[in-house]
Image (cartoon, rainbow, N blue to C red):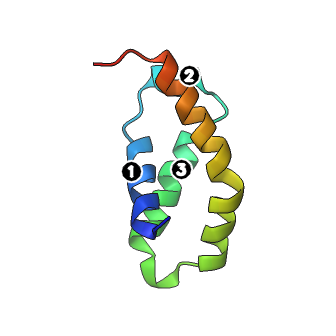
Amino acid sequence: MRLRNLQTLAESSRRSTDAIEASEPDVPCRAISGFRTILVHDDPAIDVDAVWLVMDRELPQLKAALQRMATRLPVE
């Protein structure tokens, strides 16, 4: 996954509603938003190893949570 994809994913977390967040309380939407800020504004100082750890450890659980959210929420 490219860094820009992570930025887009994290940007989307800033637009989540209370209902979406309540449907998966273990998803740290505020922390994801903070991660986006680091990715966007601290670009030269990004620790690539730390980003890789986040991707390796956190993205599989986040993907599963997002899939569950998608099945519960109405399509507009």
Measured Cα–Cα span from mark 1 to mark 3 = 8 Å
For residue 31, side relative to residue 74 (left or right): right
First along the sequence among labels 1 and 3: 1
Residue 32 tag number: 3
Relative to 30, say whether 7 is above or below.
below
Disc 1 residue type?
Answer: Glu
Q: Which residue lies at the image location 53% right of the left edge and 41% below the top edge?
A: 29
Q: Which residue lies at the image location 60% right of the left edge and 33% below the top edge?
A: 65
Disc 3 residue type?
Answer: Ile
Helix, strand or loop at label 3? It is helix
Residue 59 picture location, percent across and down: 62, 51
Helix, strand or loop at label 2? It is helix
**Quadrant position of residue 26:** top right
Mark 2 — residue? 22
Q: Which residue lies at the image location 57% right of the left edge and 26% below the top edge?
A: 68
Residue 37 picture location, percent across and down: 44, 61
Residue 11 tag number: 1
Disc 2 residue type?
Answer: Ala
